[in-house]
């Protein structure tokens, strides 16, 4: 015969086990997104420069908490080298500080090294 134990404890509800955090309590994050089309004959050089020099310089400013670099692969042209670099920041103030104090010199350096062989399009996005 199966015996059961008696307990006067209330059964937990999903809300007591996994409390929901309202949207307005979540910390907003922003992604600074740069899409760059690079000429094929400079693509490997540009990629190594980004990974080893430019991205570390951007992160050293202290305005961003992380970065990633991606290659767009759904282009029909196999000779198309378009990349996306994303930098995540915690506040708009961090982004604005970077744009005012660091971005001009870093952009100039890329123009000096790669000229018209790398064309960039920049956007700022809010993470929802």
Image: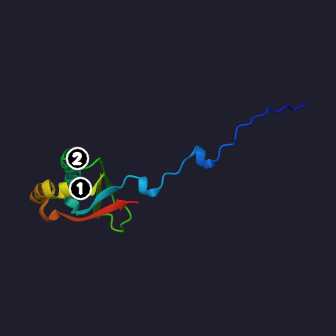
Q: Which residue is drawn at 39% across and 64% down?
A: 74
Calculate the distance from the C-alpha at mark 1 to the C-alpha at mark 2: 16 Å
Q: Which residue is drawn at 21% across and 51% down?
A: 50
Q: Is residue 12 visible?
A: yes
Q: In which quarter of the image is residue 93?
A: bottom left
Residue ID for mark 1: 93
Q: Which of 100 and 80 is in front in this view?
A: 100
Q: Can residue 110 be seen in this view?
A: no
Precedes in sequence: disc 1 or disc 2: 2
Q: Which of 49 and 93 is in front in this view?
A: 93
In the picture provided, is 34 more to the left or to the right than 115?
right
Residue closest to the far front: 8
Q: Which of 77 and 13 is in front in this view?
A: 13
Which corner quadrant holds the C terminus?
Answer: bottom left
Tally of marks: 2
SS at mark 1?
helix
Q: Where is residue 99 in the image (x, y as percent from the top left)?
A: 18, 58
Q: Residue at x 49, y 51 (%)?
A: 21
Q: Which residue is drawn at 42% across and 53% down?
A: 25
Q: Quadrant of residue 2?
A: top right
In the picture provided, is 16 more to the left or to the right than 6?
left
- Say which of marks 1 and 2 sits in front: 1
SS at mark 2?
helix
Against 102, residue 75 (above or below) is below
Residue ID for mark 2: 59
Residue closest to the far left: 112
Residue closest to the far right: 1
Residue closest to the far bottom: 76
Q: Do the residues labelled 1 and 2 touch (CB within 8 Å)?
A: no
Q: Position of residue 85 (x, y in %)?
A: 28, 56
């Amino acid at each position: 015969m199966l015996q059961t134990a008696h307990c006067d404890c209330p059964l937990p509800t999903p809300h007591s086990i996994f409390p929901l955090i309202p949207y307005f309590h979540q910390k907003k994050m922003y992604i600074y997104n740069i899409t760059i089309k690079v000429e094929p004959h400079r693509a490997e050089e540009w990629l190594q420069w980004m990974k080893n020099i430019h991205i570390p310089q951007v992160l050293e400013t202290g305005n961003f908490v992380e970065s990633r670099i991606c290659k767009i692969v759904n282009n029909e042209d196999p000779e198309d080298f378009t990349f996306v670099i994303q930098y995540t920041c915690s506040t708009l103030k961090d982004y604005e500080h970077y744009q005012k104090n660091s971005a001009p010199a870093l952009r100039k350096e890329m123009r000096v090294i790669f000229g018209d062989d790398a064309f960039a399009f920049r956007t700022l996005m809010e993470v929802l």
